[in-house]
Amino acid sequence: MTAVTKYKTKQRDQILDCLIRNKDRHITAVEIITALKQGGNPVSKATVYRYLDKLVSQGIVRKYFIEEGKSACYQYIAKNEDCGEHYHLKCIECGQLIHVECKYLEELDSHVKFHHDFEVDHSKTVLYGCCSNCTNES
Amino acid sequence: MTAVTKYKTKQRDQILDCLIRNKDRHITAVEIITALKQGGNPVSKATVYRYLDKLVSQGIVRKYFIEEGKSACYQYIAKNEDCGEHYHLKCIECGQLIHVECKYLEELDSHVKFHHDFEVDHSKTVLYGCCSNCTNES
DNA sequence: TTGCGTGCAAAGGTTTTGCATGGCA
DNA sequence: TGCCATGCAAAACCTTTGCACGCAA
């Protein structure tokens, strides 16, 4: 967490809007850039990357690395959803992010903590795999 | 799984050796290239990447995408250790990768599968957090 | 001898950075 | 007015690919 966003600008509104419009899926930086350009409000690459970084360090947006090391994906986290406390399942196929509120998974934390001496950071941890829809289709 | 390794070459031996020497941690392609160069047995980038791909598709080496989307990490999987079955904990501070063989965590799979209808892919999943050493230091 | 493997260089793609300009507060 | 934000272009990186040559079997 380096600098903090101080100014409100048209570009930042655009970027955040785009993320919110796609809050039910993840989206790459390039997709954001393309979408804004097509929408008639182009924003430069540098600005998009710089702002995304800030949003991530502020916890407003989550960053994923799934596409074979290629490009990072970003997804807006709604403020009222308290994502710090639960686990996330991310479907590799469709990109769906599933929020899981589950006692069993919460116990996982204490298990890992006491038996493996390791403190899990939920904000950075995602269980990758395949959701039921995608499992059935393939 | 595309092509299969047919020839045994000096370069391949070097690469595999390097992976085995570092079997207790993950290592990037660039690190392998550098190590071999410094060891007096340089192997070209292309060869390293191409061979790593093969090793991965043969299941001899595992590929991770953890380092902030930058470069992929590779780690040799000893044949008798069935790494497909266990979880990985990655310390955000020191970068240590911890292999966890644990019944509790194995149960996690079936739990997630039956209760949340989601099939976890171990090869892509890493639990991020802080190991005991780093927790104590900070 | 055959055909896979290697090396080099170039290309491809994503992300970062330097620097001058623009614009919010 | 003072900074921060933006845009552009260039650079930095990692990885892939084309092609000719080398070498294992």
Image: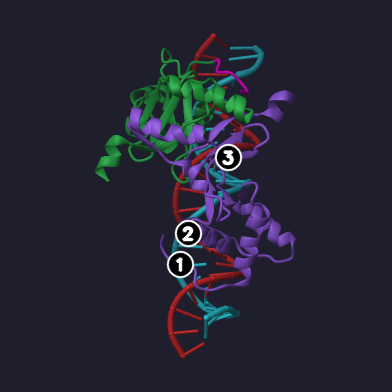
Chain colours: A green, B purple, C red, D cyan
Chain of the residue on which disc 3 is drawn:
B
Q: CA distance from mark 2 to mark 1?
A: 8 Å
- Tell me if label 2 and label 1 are in contact, CB under 8 Å: yes
Residue D10 at x, y percent in the picture: 59, 46
Above or below residue B123? Residue A52 is above
The quadrant of the picture occupied by the N terminus of chain A is top right
Instruction: Specify whether disc 2 shares its chain with disc 3.
Output: yes
- Per the image, the residue denoted by label 3 is B67
Between disc 2 and disc 3, whose residue precedes? 2
The mark lying in front, picked from 2 and 3, is: 2
Report crowding for label 3: few under 14, some 14 to 19, many 20 or more residues within 10 A (C-alpha).
some
Question: Residue at 65% of width from left, 38% of height from top?
Answer: B96
Instruction: Specify whether disc 2 shares its chain with disc 1.
Output: yes
- Which amino acid, mark 1? Val
Report crowding for label 1: few under 14, some 14 to 19, many 20 or more residues within 10 A (C-alpha).
few
Judging depth in this view, the residue of B108 and D16 nearest the camera is B108
Magenta residue check for B79:
no
Above or below residue B72? Residue A54 is above
Magenta region, residue range:
A1-6
- Per the image, the residue denoted by label 1 is B4
Residue B42 at x, y percent in the picture: 68, 65
Determine the secondary structure under disc 3.
loop
Chain of the residue on which disc 1 is drawn:
B
- Which amino acid, mark 2? Gln
Between disc 2 and disc 1, whose residue precedes? 1
